[in-house]
C-alpha cells in the first residue's frame, strides 16, 4: 500500500525538502539518519522506497495526467455505429456474406433501431423486435441472422463508453429465438448415393442436356467438397498422377474467387482411381493449368452455381427418387461423411477431409452418422461379458 503524506503546501515542520535535481521529487530525514523519498502527485506526496522508485512513480503519474479521456458523446445513435461496423465488415467479409449482413441492417435493424441511442435499445426493445419477427413467420435461424449485426454494434458502443453491457446478454432464454440451430442432415444409404450418381449420368446422356453435371455431382458426393470449393478448382489444383486435389479457393455466389472458408478449408483431398479416371476424361487435351475444371460451355469461367442447382442437382435428386426429403446441395457433404464413417474413419479424420476446423463441429453436425448400426449388438456383447460367470 502506498503511504501518503502531507502536501508541500503544509507547514515546514513536515521535513519534506525538494530534491533539487529531479522535479517533483522530495526527501526527508528519518530518525535513523537515512533519507525517506517521495514524489508529488494528485495534490499530495506519495512515499517511495528509493529515489529511483520516486522518479519512476512521478513519471507514471505524469503520463496518466497527460492522457485525456473524452467523455462519451450523447448524440451518437445506433445508425452511426452501424455505419462504422458496416465499413469494417466490408473489408473482412466475402461478397455474399457482406450482402447478407447489409440486408439485415437495411431491412430490419436500422428501420427498427437505427434512430435510437445505444442506451435506448433496451433488452425489452430487442425482445419485442424478436417477437415481431416471429409473428411475421420468420424461422429462428433467420431471426438470428437478422440480429447478428447487433453484436458488433453493441461491442463498439461499449468500447466508446455508451453502454455498460450488451442488451443481447440480458435477454431471457424464453425471449431468444429457439430452435433451427444445427441442421439435421439427411443420412444417406450406399444405395441412395449410387442412385444419385446413376441418375446424374442418365440425365447427361439425354439429347436435350446442355451440360454434363454428373462429374461435379459425383465429386461432391464422394469427396465432401463444398460446392464453391469444387467450382473454384483449376487444373493446376488437380494432380492426376498422385491421385489428389488441392482445395485452394472457393467460388462465391456472385462469381468471385475467395480464400477457403476456414484455415482448415485449405487442404489436400485424396482421389480414388475411379475419380482420377473421371477427371482425366473430363480434362481437355489442350487444357491450361489456369482453366477451371468445371468450366462453362462459353469458356473462361466456371459454371454458375444457380445453373448447377436447377439443372444438375435438383433434376438428379428428382430422377433418383430422393425429392421431398429436404436434401440440399450442402447435404451432399453428409453423403460423403456417410461413406467415410462407414469405412471406419474417426471424427478427426472426417473433419480433415471435410475441412472442418474442429472435430467437435463434425460430431455436432454429423453426430447421427457415428451411431453405428451395430451399436445394439455391441451393447449386448458388453452386457454378456459382464454377466457370464468366470470358469476356473
Image (tube, rainbow, N blue to C red):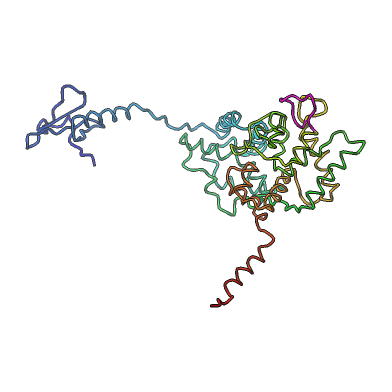
Q: Residue at x 51, y 40 (%)?
A: 119
Image quadrant in which you'd find residue 18:
top left
Who is closer to the viewer here, 247 or 329? 247
Who is closer to the viewer here, 128 or 57? 57
As drawn, 30 above or below 341: above
> Image check: 161 left or right of 380?
left
Q: Residue 255 at what x, y percent from top left?
A: 72, 29
Q: Residue 364 at what x, y percent from top left?
A: 62, 51
> Image check: 300 left or right of 164?
right
> Image check: 2 left or right of 350?
left
As drawn, 163 above or below 182: above
Q: Quadrant of the N terminus?
A: top left
Who is closer to the viewer here, 186 or 145? 186
Q: Residue 19 at what x, y percent from top left?
A: 16, 25
Q: Residue at x 75, y 45 (%)?
A: 328
Task: Provide the residue span drawn in magenta.
Answer: 282-294
Q: Residue at x 50, y 36 (%)?
A: 157
> Image check: 321 left or right of 47?
right
Residue reaching furthest right? 207
Amino acid at each position: 500500500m502506498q503511504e501518503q503524506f502531507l502536501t508541500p503546501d503544509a507547514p515546514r515542520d513536515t521535513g519534506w525538502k525538494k530534491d533539487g535535481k529531479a522535479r517533483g521529487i522530495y526527501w526527508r530525514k528519518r530518525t535513523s539518519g537515512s533519507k525517506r523519498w517521495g514524489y508529488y502527485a494528485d495534490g499530495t506526496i506519495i512515499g517511495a522506497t528509493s529515489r529511483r522508485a520516486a522518479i519512476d512513480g512521478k513519471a507514471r503519474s505524469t503520463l496518466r495526467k497527460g492522457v485525456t479521456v473524452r467523455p462519451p458523446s450523447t448524440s451518437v445513435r445506433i445508425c452511426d455505429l452501424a455505419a462504422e461496423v458496416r465499413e469494417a465488415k466490408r473489408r473482412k467479409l466475402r461478397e455474399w456474406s457482406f450482402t447478407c449482413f447489409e440486408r439485415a441492417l437495411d431491412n430490419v435493424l436500422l428501420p427498427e433501431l437505427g434512430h435510437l441511442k445505444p442506451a435506448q435499445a433496451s433488452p425489452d426493445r430487442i425482445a419485442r423486435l424478436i417477437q415481431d419477427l416471429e409473428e411475421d413467420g420468420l424461422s429462428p435461424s433467420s431471426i438470428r441472422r437478422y440480429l447478428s449485426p447487433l453484436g458488433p454494434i453493441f461491442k463498439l458502443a461499449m468500447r466508446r463508453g455508451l453502454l455498460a453491457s450488451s442488451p443481447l446478454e440480458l435477454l431471457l432464454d424464453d425471449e431468444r429465438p429457439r430452435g433451427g440451430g444445427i441442421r439435421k442432415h439427411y443420412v444417406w444409404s450406399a444405395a441412395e448415393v449410387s442412385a444419385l450418381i446413376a441418375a446424374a449420368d442418365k440425365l447427361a446422356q439425354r439429347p436435350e442436356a446442355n451440360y454434363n453435371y454428373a462429374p461435379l455431382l459425383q465429386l461432391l458426393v464422394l469427396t465432401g467438397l463444398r460446392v464453391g470449393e469444387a467450382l473454384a478448382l483449376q487444373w493446376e489444383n488437380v494432380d492426376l498422377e498422385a491421385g489428389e486435389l488441392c482445395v485452394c479457393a472457393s467460388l462465391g455466389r456472385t462469381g468471385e474467387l475467395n480464400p477457403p472458408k476456414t484455415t482448415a478449408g485449405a487442404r489436400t483431398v485424396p482421389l480414388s482411381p475411379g475419380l482420377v479416371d473421371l477427371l482425366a476424361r473430363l480434362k481437355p487435351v489442350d487444357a491450361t493449368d489456369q482453366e477451371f475444371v468445371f468450366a462453362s460451355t462459353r469458356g473462361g469461367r466456371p459454371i454458375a452455381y444457380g445453373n448447377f442447382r436447377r439443372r444438375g442437382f435438383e433434376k438428379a435428386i428428382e430422377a433418383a427418387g430422393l425429392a421431398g426429403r429436404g436434401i440440399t446441395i450442402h447435404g451432399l457433404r453428409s453423403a460423403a461423411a456417410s461413406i467415410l464413417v462407414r469405412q471406419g474413419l474417426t471424427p478427426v479424420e472426417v473433419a480433415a477431409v471435410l475441412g472442418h476446423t474442429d472435430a467437435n463441429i463434425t460430431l455436432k453436425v454429423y453426430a447421427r452418422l457415428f451411431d453405428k448400426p451395430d451399436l445394439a449388438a455391441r451393447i449386448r456383447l458388453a452386457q454378456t461379458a459382464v454377466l457370464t460367470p468366470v470358469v476356473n
